[in-house]
Each structure stands twice: as structure tokens, then as C-alpha cells.
Amino acid sequence: MDTRTMSSLHTMICSPMFLEGWSPPSGVSEITIGSASLAEKLSFVTLIFSARKILWPPWSTTTNMASQALRKCLLKTKLNSLQTASSVNMAFCSSFRSPLASSILLCFCMLLLGVHGGSRTLYIVYLGDVKHGHPNDVIASHHDILSSILGSKEESMACIVHNYKHGFSGFAAMLTEDEAKQVAEFPEVISVQPSGWHTATTTRSWDFLGLSYQMPSDLLHKGRYGEDIIVGVVDTGIWPESRSFSDEGYGPVPSRWKGVCQVGEVWDRNNCSRKIIGARFYSAGIDQDALHKTEYLSARDADTHGTHTASTAAGSVVEAASFHGLASGFARGGAPHARIAVYKVLWKTVDGGTGGSTANILAAIDHAIHDGVDVLSLSLGGSEIPSIAALHAVQRGITVVYSAGNDGPSPQTIWNTAPWVITVAASKTDRSFPTMITLGNKQQIVGQSLYYLGKNSSRSSFKSLANGGSCSAKLLNGTDVRGKIVLCTSPKSPLTTGPRGVHPGAQQNVFDAGGAGLIFVQYTTDLLRETDCNGRPCVLVDIDTGKKIEKYIDANRSPKVKIEPTRSITGQETLAPKVASFSSRGPSPDYADIIKPDIAAPGANILAATGSSYGIMSGTSMSAPHVSGIIALLKALHPNWSPAALKSAIVTTASVTDEHGMPILAEGLPRKTADPFDYGGGHIDPNRAADPGLIYDIDPRDYNYFFGCTITKTSASCNGTSVPGYNLNLPSISVPNLRYPVTIPRAVTNVGEANAVYRAEIQSPPGVKMEVEPSVLVFNAANKAITFQVKLSPLWRLQGDYTFGSLTWRNGQKTVRIPVATRMTIHDFYADVA
């Protein structure tokens, strides 16, 4: 099979005109693919090609290698029943709209790669703003570039995986390294980068934030519960049958909505509703052999992560939700009357993880811009997502919310750090899950877990207790732990693999050896979700209590222990909020002159929908949709506010102390008082954000200066950061290289009472003198926006570390606070590692 033949096949499959006007043979109402023989599958494909009068060589004349590869590929595809006529037309008339189209096209793409030498990689080509009036013209411009390198439009169409044509211009294509370099030479091309891989990073949390549904707060009531705000969720899909997505009582879908309900495996148009108003999925380039057997080639969620995040942001109100009786109460999203648009980009894999490509994520953002979402929520990490797509969304008034990552408490581990997005850290609320441990000597110790009695389990009773050390397979080998509770100890030093790395293996080793449960000794790492052992006791204790249990074992010949089922409690007895241990920390390794994260929100032990039931999850994946839900409420209350204004409102009103006036702490090594690299402006306070008084607004075009980009109708060029990030009008200031006095401009806009006077309260970073001019801002009906200067001067000449302060504008009880971070330096590129 020659290159031109394969290119033609790929071109026809990809063409949106492929089945236009085609109808199935008379009398055929359904084509069932799943139970068809290989010959029938091939015949069906042949039928489609014949219907379009496409020259397709007989299957017997293909080369042995191509034939075997295609047959092998089709044998492995997951093809299900597919309605013909309109369904087949829809399936082939857009990229990967059905299991059939996805599977066949993937097979052809694989063969095409083999024909072309097999050394191609998926690249993202970015061309800036859309410069043509119609999406088809944008696509044509992409092919003009690529065909000039590959030799023909057919070759170009064969290699392009996605055309980005709505919110921004660009494409994802399979290219060799040399071809990618040639594409980068075109004057209209801004950047060419390989596509990366990304992973996925409730009843009490909303009450903890002051957004009680039973006693509606100012923001929840004034924001009309987020009514008709559209929240786009880019994740693993959604489980539409969950009670959290009931559309009972909802009015018609907003007329401004331009999205689609993409049909796929176990998903038809009836799975969309007045609540889930749109659904798309993106499987281009995904190896179906690597997908978990429970995965669906549709927007349906096999992993539960996307269902959890969507219900956290905008789930409807559900009574009596719980996880096996734990954390019971009302489950709902922050904006329970908002609409949800689903964009599935992450896929469950055979190794139990989830992942998706940069190319597919960009396609989802491009579609979301076109569809008309108001807020985009992305609980993604793994590698930095090209932020330029989010910039195009922001420039169209869409607020983009990202998770910060789960690589804390190490510094400089934060993801998604562009200044135009909201990057969210994770916090712990005042709910805990105490689990009573009673030793044989009647001594009682309280651990933490998600232990519940299984359906066939009897009441708790005393069991033998054994010390398993690190509970490695080697240590447990030859030790009789059958039917016993095993004490396992994690490494105490971060120089070795910490508790998060050891716990899963220790747990598995104990159960493989016949153990009845385990008590795991660790420093705080917020591992609670790992203690769901399907009705078997898996309890976390700290090092102090672990020592007590160990001494008891050593002092007794037949040590015993009884573990009671977990209770869940809330209230002021728990010190909260605290930044969770796993939450990634700043400063940003990419943009040190921008404080990241921006804000912290609940992300530990969050109850939300998981399929048709409810489950507890932890991660910044859970904190990001909390902010997305709050932004939806604020957007409903202030529909004309820009994304920058909405971001400013939550950052400047955030709390840095708990309700007792104690400084918020950050879990880590060791636990410490939190600083801006842990939580940005602080912990989110939704009701205060509804009336922030002053906002730091930004014209989205100003972000272009940050990147030093010049974009015209015919060309674009970027020369890196030409303006320091701290000169953007952000609600924070970071100066990573303070050697000499620097003056930083800021402007605030009054969105409160027309006649107001605000006075500056300065908390200088240690070692730095901070001055503000003017120190008094006087607003009236004619003077709504005022510019001021912040001067930062180092007090010493030294190579230092970051220190923190703040600038607060006060008007009576109303305060508008921004964090300040500075680092005094002497040398450039000084490695502070010794």
C-alpha cells in the first residue's frame, strides 16, 4: 500500500464531508458492529467507501504487513451498536465522534505512521489569534502551511489531529523533528512544541466556607445559586445518572449556548439535559490498547474523578448523601443551579491511572470558547499546560481555574502558573474522621481513617496485634500475621521514600499475608483516602501515638487491639483551615515574579458524586472546582466583571487567620505558618468576595506585553518576557531579584460605595522597606480608579531568601489585602543549594 493511498484514506475518513448526503441501504435501520465478524467489519468499512465512490483497493491486494496490522487493530477495537443514517453521518463528520470512527481512524493513522517511517511525534503549532472570519478558512490556512512542507494537502490532512479554529488559531499534527523545525520557520507561527501528557491531580466544605444552603448566605442568595451560569469541566467525563446532575426544576438551556451533545459509547442525546447541557470527548492519539476495560469512548466517566469535580463545582442539591454513613448531609456544588458542559480529555488506563494529551486539552479549550462557557474548571497536572489557550479564553471573558498540583510540600512544585488563570491550592476543613483504637490494656488512642463495617461484618472485637516494622514483603515473609492487625511504620526522613510512597505497598503486603488490617504510623501527609480498605480497618496514627502502640506490643506476650468504625465530626475543636500537605507550593519555577498559587480552597476529604454513589477524595483537583463554583456565583452577581476582577475579589478578601484569629498553618516538614507560596492571598472567603470594595483589574491585552508578543494579521513573534511580571496589575507583588530600590505601579477600581476613603496599612517583608504613594485613596462618583506606587528598597546587600509582607487598603471594617514577596540578591543565576 503506497503512501498516497494511505494518505487518501486518512483524508477521506477525516473529512467533515465524508458521509454528507449518504444514507444506508434500503431497509437497514441499524448496523451492529460489536458482534460482527472481522470480515463483516471490513465489509462495512468497504460499504462506506463504496457509497462515497472512493477508490479502495480490495482487501486481498493490500500488503501483508498492512493487512495484518489493520486486522489486528480492528480486532482490538471497542465497536458497539451504532444507529445508521444520521448517527453514522454524525459519527464520521467530526473528529472521533463515535467508537466506530475513533477506532477505524486510529487504525488508519497507525498504518500511515508506519508508511511514513514511524518517527513522528505529536506537536502543537500555535499561530495566535484567529485571523479569518470562518473556521473553514482557519483550517485552510493550517493546511497551506503544512502542505508546503509535506508536499500536498492530502499529506497535511493525514497528519493533522486537531485544528484549533475558534478561540485561537493552531493545530496539532504528527510531525518529524525536522518537519517541526521547518514549520517553526514560518513567520506566522509563534511556537511549535511537543504535546505533553497530563494527569488528574460537598457536604461540609460549603458550610465551612459560609455558603450554607439551609441558611443562604449573601453570595449564594444574591448570586441566584449560579443560575444559568455555564461551567465547563475539562476532566475524565461525567456520570449523568448521578442525583447530583438532576435537572428537575431547571428552565430551558440558555439560548447563548452553542455546544453539542456528542454521542458515543453508552451515551446518547438523552444523557444531556437541562443540567448537563453539553458533552464532548477527545480520544485522538489515545492508544486504545492502553485503556482500562471499563473505559467508555464517550463523555461517560469510568474513573469518577470528573464526576466528583463537576458535582463539587455545580452539582444539584442531594439530601442524605454519605460515604458508607460517613460525612452524611446535603451534597451539592458551590453553584447548584449552574449548568454543566463536559469536555472529556483524561482517560482511565490499564495501570489504574488517568491521562490525556496536551493536544486534546487544547481542543477542548478551543471548543469551550466557541460553545459559550462562563467558567472553565481544569483539575489537571502532570506537566505545564500551554497557557496561551487559557489566555484566549480569558480575553473572551471566560475565567479559567486550574489546580495547583499535588506535589507538596516541596517548594517550586506548582503547576499552571500563568498570571491570567486562577491557580488553586488545597486546604483542610474542620471535619475529621476519628477512629477509636483500644489496646488490650484498655488504653485508648484516636487515629484517623475511613473505616466502616462491611455488609457481612460483625461488630468490632479484639484481635491479635503484631509489629510489622516497615511492612515490606521481605519483613512480613515468615511472620505469621494471619487474622491480626499489623502495626506498620513509615520512614521518618524525607530523604527516603515518605509515607505516601510506602503506604500503598505496606497495605497490600499486609493483606497479601493474611492480615486483618493495619495501623500505619506516619508524619502528617493527608493520606486519609488511602484508608478506605473496603470494610477492613486501615488507620493512620502519628509518630507519638505509634510509639505508644509499639511500647505496648513490646511489653505484652499476646498484644490485642480493637478498632471501632470511624465517626465523622465537625466543629471548632479542629484547627482549620490548614494548607494540605500534598498541595504544591510556590514560587513558580517559570514566573518567579508572579505569586502562585493565587488562593487556597477546601481540597482534603471532600465528599461528592462518584458514579451513582458518593465518595471522598483529596487533592487540588477537589479545591479547583470549589473556586470554580464560587466564581460562577460571583459571575451571576457581577456579570460585567472581567476574569481579572473576579480573581482580584477572591484574592484580596481571603483570610490569613482562622476564626480564632490564629494564623493559618501549612502542613509540611515541619508544619509551619502558611505564607503566600502555600496559599497565595490566603483562604477563600466567598461572602467577603461578593463585596470586595476595590478590585485590581487588568485589560486582557496587557498580558501580551508580559510575553513580549507582537501579533499582526500576517505574522507574530515573541521574545520572551519583555516586561517584568510584577508590573502587571495583579492582586499580589513578587520581586525575586531585589538589589536596588524598585517602584511598582498598581491601580485599583472602586466597586463599593461611591464616596469612600481607603488608607494604606503596610507590613514590610523583613529586610525590605516598603513605601506607598499616595497612602490615602479618595474615591467619589467622578474618581472611581486611582493609580498608586509601591516602592521596595533592600535594607542590606546580601544573597537572601524570600521574605513576605502585605499591603492592605482599609476603609472602616472593609479591607483589601494583597501579599508581597521579595528576595534580596547580589548575583544572577546563583544556585542557593549549599
Image: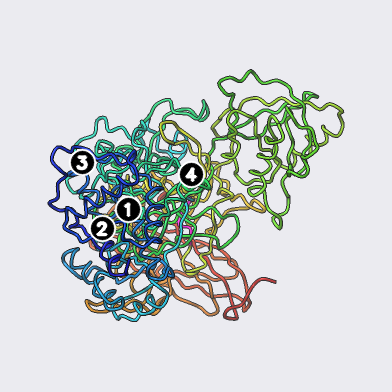
Residue at image coords 30%, 68%: 170
The label nearer to you, 2 versus 3, is 2
What whole-number distance in Å separates the C-alpha atoms at marks 1 and 2?
9 Å
Q: Can you give x and y, in whole percent of width and height, for residue 61 in the image?
A: 31, 60
Give the amino acid at mark 4: Pro
580 or 773, nearer to the observer: 580
Residue corresponding to mark 4? 602
Disc sitting over residue 13 in the figure: 2
Q: Can you give x and y, in whole percent of width and height, for residue 86 in the image?
A: 18, 44
How many residues crowd around disc 4 within 10 Å: few (fewer than 14), some, or many (20 or more)? Answer: many
Residue at image coords 21%, 51%: 48
Q: Is mark 1 on a helix, strand or loop?
A: helix
Instruction: Relative to 253, say whether 176 is above or below.
Output: below
Disc sitting over residue 522 in the figure: none
What whole-number distance in Å separates the C-alpha atoms at marks 4 and 2?
46 Å
Q: From where the camera sits, is residue 229 visible?
A: no
Q: Quadrant of the C terminus?
A: bottom right
Do callouts 4 and 3 mark residues in contact (Cβ within 8 Å)? no
Do callouts 1 and 2 mark residues in contact (Cβ within 8 Å)? yes
What whole-number distance in Å separates the C-alpha atoms at marks 4 and 1?
43 Å
199 or 436, nearer to the observer: 199
Instruction: Relative to 460, say whether 57 is above or below.
Output: below
| Residue 598 covered by magenta stretch | yes
First of labels 4, 2 by sequence position: 2
From the viewer's perspective, tell me whether residue 315 is left or right of residue 675. left
Residue corresponding to mark 1? 104
The picture quadrant where one finds residue 30 is top left
First of labels 2, 3 by sequence position: 2
What whole-number distance in Å separates the C-alpha atoms at marks 4 and 3?
30 Å
Q: Magenta region: which residues?
A: 596-602
Q: Is mark 3 on a helix, strand or loop?
A: loop
| Residue 612 covered by magenta stretch | no
